Amino acid sequence: MGILLADARELMKQKTKPAKIRFLLIAMAKTLRKGVSIEIFSRGSPAGAAIMRPMQWACSKLSNVLVAMNLALPRVGTASNTVIATIPVGRNPVAVAISPDGTRAYAINLNSNLASVIDTASNTVVATIPVGTNPEGIAITPDGTRAYVTNLTSFDVSVIDTASNTVVATVAVGQFPVGAAITPDGTRAYVVNNGATVSVIDTAGNTVVATIPVSTTPFGIAITPDGTRAYVTHQGSTVSVIDIASNTVVATISIAVAYDAHFGIAVTPDGTRAYVTGNHSNTVYVIDTATNTVVATIPVTSPFGVAITPAPQVPTSKEDCKHGGYLKFGPPAGPFKNQGQCVSYVEHH
């Protein structure tokens, strides 16, 4: 397994003010079924990561760069996991998200209050966008038109128009917003506030339409591919399960450790499993989303973040390419920049 050892990351926020804790990060790749793999980010900086096969980008906080890794599979069948570029960005990059078409990476810089926009073809910064105070997280809508940036100490979310790379709205949310996730239909943005709430934003009007009380010190969030559930991690011993239809907590999953720091969470493409990092327990917990129980534990070193590569998908008809459908296809067929490229693939295969 390939290992990337990088600098350090300052994270772990308390309810009243952020506490600075440094971690080292090890990015480990574990191959799963059907070509899907899980990337576990351990002990610190790169503070955040995102995957677009065959590339992975990780934020390196102390050196203020974005690291691009090659995840391509050579003929021997093992990932090369090599760093192919380092991209200077703002101060203390902590999170990164990739546009659905794979052409842009958005890096969030905690201490310069900026979002850096990277052209993934050239690995260069093509735009810098001022956002709120101490931006912490980011999520991009499925159609790629908007990016939602959580701002830790201004208690709001900056909404970026990705066509113009400008902030078009600022949405007030709860105390210390950290994580964010968008529903698969793009109609709602769920923002985790470290002050024990989740704000639900209507992406059409960019207004908060619901506030959901959760357990103390929530941090990460992931939404199932069918859009029915949101899983929220806590810096304690639980994971909250939110029903998207009613915006209520319908289950609380207990983790064996009395107190752990559960920062990262990711759901598999088929929606059957959620992977949760336990930083203090040196463990990744595997949750069965049908029963909302922990079904496996994986020992690692101080894990922080986690990301799962998408399962290979190919369009089988021209209908698959319509109405933005081309955006969901990655390797080996895509990513496609437009519907025409997707239709052309169908015609020639």
Image (cartoon, rainbow, N blue to C red):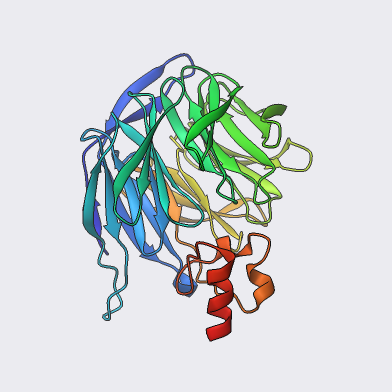
Residue for point 34% across, 42% down: 126
Q: Residue at x 29, y 68 (%)?
A: 79
- Quadrant where the image shows the N terminus: bottom left
Q: Which quadrant of the figure has residue 80?
A: bottom left
Quadrant containing the C terminus is bottom right
In the orientation shown, which residue stands out farthest toward the bottom? 349
Give the quarter of the image for residue 72. Answer: bottom left
The spot of residue 325 in percent (x, y) is: 63, 63
Q: Quadrant of residue 222?
A: top right
Residue most extreme to the right:
246
In the image, what residue occupies the spot 33% across and 34% down? 93
- Residue 194 at x, y percent in the picture: 52, 25
Q: Is residue 150 visible to us here?
A: yes
Q: Nearer the viewer, residue 26 or 252?
A: 26
Specify whether 249 is left or right of 127. right
Question: In this view of the protein, which residue sits in the foreground, 241 or 188?
Answer: 188
Using the rendered image of the protein, determine whether residue 233 is visible from the camera's viewpoint. Answer: no
**Residue 284 x/y as whole percent:** 43, 50
